[in-house]
């Protein structure tokens, strides 16, 4: 096993090498390598990669794969590592799921040694490079990569061949409520629609989300609705803002159920606190 692990290092174990290479192709070569020991493994002993970022699998495409496997069998063995209870999938989860659908009892496999970091790296990068993830899964994958590598968004963007604004925009989607994230993940609204919603309070956001789906609003129409909501929100508190401005003698803004009072130095802050206490 040590020898096979060293051989895998030659394929690019280091994460930076994997990011710069065509990892899916390398994994495929590893699985098709005729020199590697292959066996049929009891499917009940196999479990998914615990670091798999993809949580949604297209049912129609899985069914197509299942039909193909039913006719031709699994042509490329899945890649596994041993675990305490059996085996964990390194690569080939779609083949595994399709095999379960048609009731296969055994699946062809190659068993190699991988540590936890390798498992996570392979699962994340393989999916990202193959563009199999929805944008919410992609965002979670970026966060996991950042934590693993301890790098900035800028550094991550360079490694993945993306722009920093793209990475930032994808990650910003994770600030949205779970209800909105679900609609994005299920492709009910686009990433551009979702980006327009960032900054609204939750009630306005969910109301506009329903409107987008019900009336099939395009991105421009959505942005116009968002601007109208923000303008209404701002105008709603003009009187109150002026009252507070007159009282504190400072610039005041009210939005999203919050009050902001601007000050320039510690002396001005003390004046604001004193004015609040006196009131």
Image: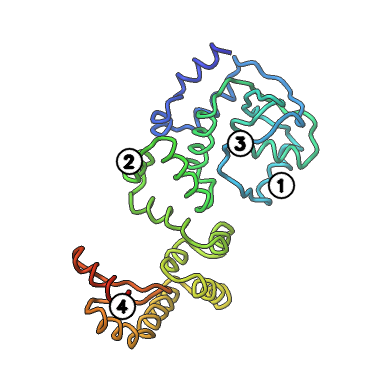
State the separation of the CA atoms marked 1 and 4: 70 Å
Q: Pointer 3 and pointer 1: residues touching (CB < 8 Å)?
A: no
Left/right of residue 58 with respect to residue 234 in the rendered view: right
Tell me what residue is drawn at x 32 percent, y 41 percent.
Answer: 155
Q: CA distance from mark 1 to mark 2?
A: 39 Å
Point out the residue furthest to the top here: 3
Residue 278, label in figure: 4
Q: CB under 8 Å between callouts 1 and 2?
A: no
The residue to which callout 2 is attached is: 155
| Upstream in sequence: badge 2 or badge 4 | 2
Please tell me which residue is depicted at 71% across the width and 47% down the height of the picture.
63
Q: Quadrant of residue 95?
A: top right
Q: Which residue is disc 1 drawn over? A: 63
Of tags 3 and 4, which is closer to the observer? 4
Give the quarter of the figure containing the N terminus.
Answer: top right
Frontmost residue, 59 versus 5 = 5
**Callout 1: SS:** helix
Q: Nearer the viewer, residue 39 or 270?
A: 270
> Nearer the viewer's eye, disc 1 or disc 2?
2
């Amino acid at each position: 096993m040590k020898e096979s692990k060293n051989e895998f290092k030659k394929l690019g174990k280091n994460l930076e090498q994997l990011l710069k290479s065509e990892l899916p192709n390398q994994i495929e070569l590893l699985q098709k390598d005729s020199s590697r020991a292959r066996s049929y493994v009891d499917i009940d002993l196999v479990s998914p990669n615990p670091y798999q970022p993809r949580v949604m699998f297209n049912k129609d495409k899985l069914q197509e794969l299942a039909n193909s496997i039913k006719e031709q069998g699994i042509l490329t063995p899945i890649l596994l590592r041993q675990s305490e209870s059996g085996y964990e999938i390194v690569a080939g989860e779609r083949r595994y799921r399709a095999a379960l659908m048609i009731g296969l009892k055994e699946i062809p496999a190659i068993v190699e040694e991988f540590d936890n970091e390798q498992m996570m790296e392979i699962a994340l990068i393989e999916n990202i490079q193959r563009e199999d993830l929805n944008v919410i899964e992609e965002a979670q994958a970026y966060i996991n990569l950042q934590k693993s590598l301890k790098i900035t968004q800028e550094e991550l963007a360079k490694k993945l061949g993306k722009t920093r604004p793209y990475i930032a925009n994808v990650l910003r989607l994770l600030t949205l409520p779970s209800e909105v994230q679900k609609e994005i993940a299920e492709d009910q609204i686009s990433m551009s629609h979702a980006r327009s919603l960032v900054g609204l309070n939750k009630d306005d956001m969910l109301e506009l989300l329903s409107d987008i789906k019900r009336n099939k609003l395009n991105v421009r129409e959505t942005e116009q609705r968002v601007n109208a909501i923000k303008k209404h929100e701002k105008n709603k508190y003009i009187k109150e803002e002026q009252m507070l401005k007159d009282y504190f003698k400072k610039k005041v803004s009210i939005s999203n159920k919050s009050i902001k009072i601007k000050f320039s130095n510690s002396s001005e802050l003390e004046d604001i606190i004193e004015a609040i206490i006196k009131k």
